[in-house]
Image (spheres, rainbow, N blue to C red):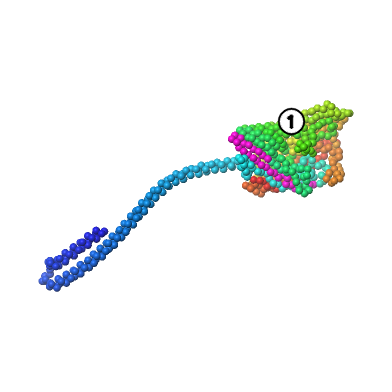
Amino acid sequence: MRQVASAVLTVLLAVTLAMAQDAATGTPAKRSKRSATPSSGISAQLSQMQKSIDVQQQQIQQLMQQLQSRDQEVQRLQEQVNQVQSTASQAQQKADTAVAQSTAQQKDVGAVQSDVSDLKGTVTNTALAVQETQKTVGESPLALRIKGITITPGGFLAAETAWRQRGLASDVNTPFNSVPLPGSSQSNLSEFFGSGRQSRISLLAEGKLKDAKLTGYYETDFLSAGITSNNNESNSYTNRQRQVWGQAALHGWSFTGGQMWSLVTETRKGVDNRTEALPMTIDAQYHVGFSWARQYGFRVAKDFNDKVWLAFSVENPQTTFVAHGNASNFLLGAAGTGGGLYNPTANYSFNSAPDFIVKAAFEPGWGHFEVFGVVSQFRDRVFPNGTAATPSAAGAFNDSRVGGGVGANARGSLFHKHVDVGLHLLAGDGVGRYGTTGLPDATVRPDGTLALVRAYQSLGTLEWHSAKWDVYANAGGEYAARTAYLSSTGKGVGYGSPLFSNAGCLDETLPGSNGFTPGGLANCTGDTRNIIEGTFGFWYRFYKGSKGAVQWGPQYSYVVRNTWSGVGGEPHGVENMFFTSFRYYLP
């Protein structure tokens, strides 16, 4: 732009000088037809031209100043451009450095993302494993992890009541074989008890090895009494052992030992411990017709593809015994020795061998089915000279009998698992103690040898389940056969003899002097023929979730105890019972 301005000024200056020269030298121009103007006209023109030149020079000077200002502005702008270019160059260098760093960071971010993805997969797998474990355990329990062992507390806290039309002086567990006959004073007195003794505490310990799972289980409640226990003030009842056992499971085999539910007891899944199919009753003695025991056992079981299970157990034996009219010519056992930590007020039979139980369980796709067998050995010592004119122990010998029975259980779900139907049967000789009523296993012949009592036990259950409700109805019965003999003198001996007197079973007698001893019935043998119970009840859950469960329920039961006929008839006792329970189950 500066060069263009210089050229324009040069041309203007040349033109101006040429015009001035023409004027000074008198260069001819177009002339009018008139003659030449005088010299004064020429001087005026030169003066005018000089002024024009001065004006033009001023303009040129202004243009030169403007050009100089513009040159300075251009120089300043050029410096700014140079500075901007330098800044841009530095920014480019920083950008290149940032890109390099970003590339490295992207690699690091990619590695981190890969690690995060792996971690998410691990967390997902862990969550699924936890969910499966929670399903196996049943509820979402709070567990403690100590030295690789998972310890899960459980149980419930109970506030319960029991009302009976006829007094039994019992808590929330009913002695069914003691239902009073009509002549008993208790038949005219009802009873009410409130109790928290069925509250239960349990601990489950589980540990896993490479190829095996180790399990230990402890369960206790307060339904036992020490020599100082009473209901007067502190109600200080003792803690009792329900279950204490350990288990090792591997490759479909399980080995379990300790105090546990007998293998006779029905289960809901295979032959697994802690899946026992117990009646839903509040009554801690469960229900007439329910076959069970909790005792020492060592159990071996094999699982075949979660469809078939075979199990064998060796369990603690005991003989329940009733006899009338017999002579003192036999010995079955003795009261417990206090120093041996047995109860000195209870009788213990001298057992020759444990009970042996085998079971097969099937789950073909619908329902759960079991068949099982029990083998028990019974023994007493016989004194043949115990009835001689001069009694002596000479010639005493041991008499042994083998008893047992067979049983079956079936259980299935209907209507999308809202309804459960169950049926239980057990029949055999010497299996009375496996029934909930405690009917006898054996009696005695006139010669002192043992005679096993045939027994039948049956129970049917119907249950309806929903999210909030469990409704149940049960019907069951137990039977003990007449096992009677004639002595050499023609007296009735054994159990349920028609020669036994029942004449006084309807006649009330005077109580003892202290006010807490009901009068015993005179001339009333009253051996039980059968006991029948019908029950209806329900449970309503106010809450069930991560904090546990809270539920309430009532139970009504009607019990009939029928006796074997004897001299004077065959009396029977009737009991109406009503229970309530409010429970909080630990999560």
Q: Which residue is mark 1?
A: 353
Tell me residue 46's x, y (percent): 16, 70
Tell me residue 93's x, y (percent): 38, 49
Rendered residue at 77%/35% (across/down) = 348
| Extreme-top residue of the structure | 395
Pick the residue in front: 521 or 547. 547
Please tell me whether the stretch drawn in magenta is mainly helix, strand or loop: strand
Q: Which of the image's four quarters has the N terminus?
A: bottom left
Residue stretch in magenta: 190-218
Question: In the shown orientation, is residue 20 left or right of residue 497?
Answer: left
Tell me residue 221's x, y (percent): 71, 43
Task: Tell me the SS state at disc 1.
Answer: loop
Q: Is residue 398 above or below residue 155?
A: above
- In the rendered image, which quarter is residue 302 located in? top right
Q: Which of the image's four quarters has the C terminus?
A: top right
| Extreme-left residue of the structure | 35
Three-letter residue code for mark 1: Ala
Question: In the shown orientation, is residue 113 left or right of residue 437?
Answer: left
